[in-house]
Image (tube, rainbow, N blue to C red):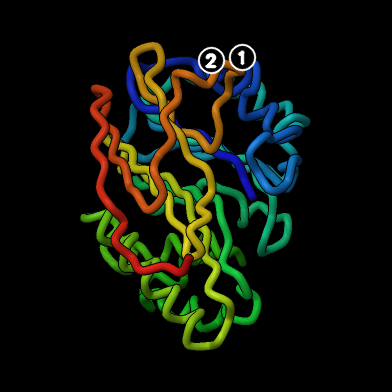
Amino acid sequence: MCRFLAYIGKPILLDNVMTDQSHSLVSQSMAAREAKTDVNADGCGLGWYGERSMPGIYRSILPAWSDPNLIGLLAQIRSGLFMAHVRSATSGGVSYANCHPFTHRTRLFMHNGMISGYRKLRARIEALVDEELYENCQGTTDSEAMFHIALSRGLLTDPHDAICRTLFDVAAVTAAHKVPERIRFAAAFSDGEQLWGFRWASDARPPTLYYRPMNGGTVLASEPFEDDQAAWTAVPPNTAIRISADGAVQQSAIDVPYCD
């Protein structure tokens, strides 16, 4: 499973949360604490909003800890809304196209999770993507497929409803083709003004997801980046949260049936 981090609020230098913490995201690429795999070395990526509406994007197939270009960017970029991801591949090879975050127009999306049997089901799941969006799919991961399915179901206008519909439709494909229904999904999405987080699983074992206030902003992360975890709040299972730039956090249920 991958690790990710997102921030919204007062503009900060990215290295404040990416490298300067005791258990930073770059550290998690070498030694994650709450993931199935300790090492997340199958690429890394960064997306940030600056002076223009279109986000900046950096992706690399190098592990985050050994990518000097990433480390250099983190020390120089200041942003009030950004996302970062370190990858441990569950589907799709190590390639630039398979690195997160994924983007569409002014939107950013990244994912931690998996669809069981994805190699067998890939054609059927990709068939859920609208034809006009399919040509934008460049990689081979279940993550990018989920993003484009959600785009096909209205992610640009109603993120919560689009993600619920996506999870329901993908679960229906796995059930119809007698693949054990095991979909684990944690994701972050932004339109450049707000940040959404999602945590759900078909087997009641969703990937970890937390948030906390910090230095005039709010951090959303796969796992805490500090030894003292008291300031962090776990996102409940089957829950979506929306975080505004002023720090307001709203929760809503992801009302999709699942198996215990």
Q: Secondary structure at mark 2?
A: helix
Q: Which mark is residue 20?
A: 1
Instruction: Please tell me in which quadrant of the rendered image residue 121 appears.
Output: bottom right
Q: Position of residue 207 (x, y in %)?
A: 53, 49
Q: Is residue 163 left or right of residue 44?
A: left
Q: Is residue 27 left or right of residue 258?
A: right
Farthest bottom residue?
177
Per the image, the residue denoted by label 2 is 16
Instruction: Please tell me in which quadrant of the rendered image residue 27 appears.
Output: top right
Check the image and report above or below for 129 versus 244: below
The reply to whether residue 161 is in sight is yes
Check the image and report above or below for 21 versus 251: above
Q: Amino acid at mark 2?
A: Asn
Local crowd at mark 1 within 10 Å, few (<14), some, or many (≥20)?
some
* Residue at point 24%, 22% (across, down): 246
**In this orientation, which residue lies closer to the viewer: 108 or 3?**
3
Q: Position of residue 155 (x, y in %)?
A: 30, 58
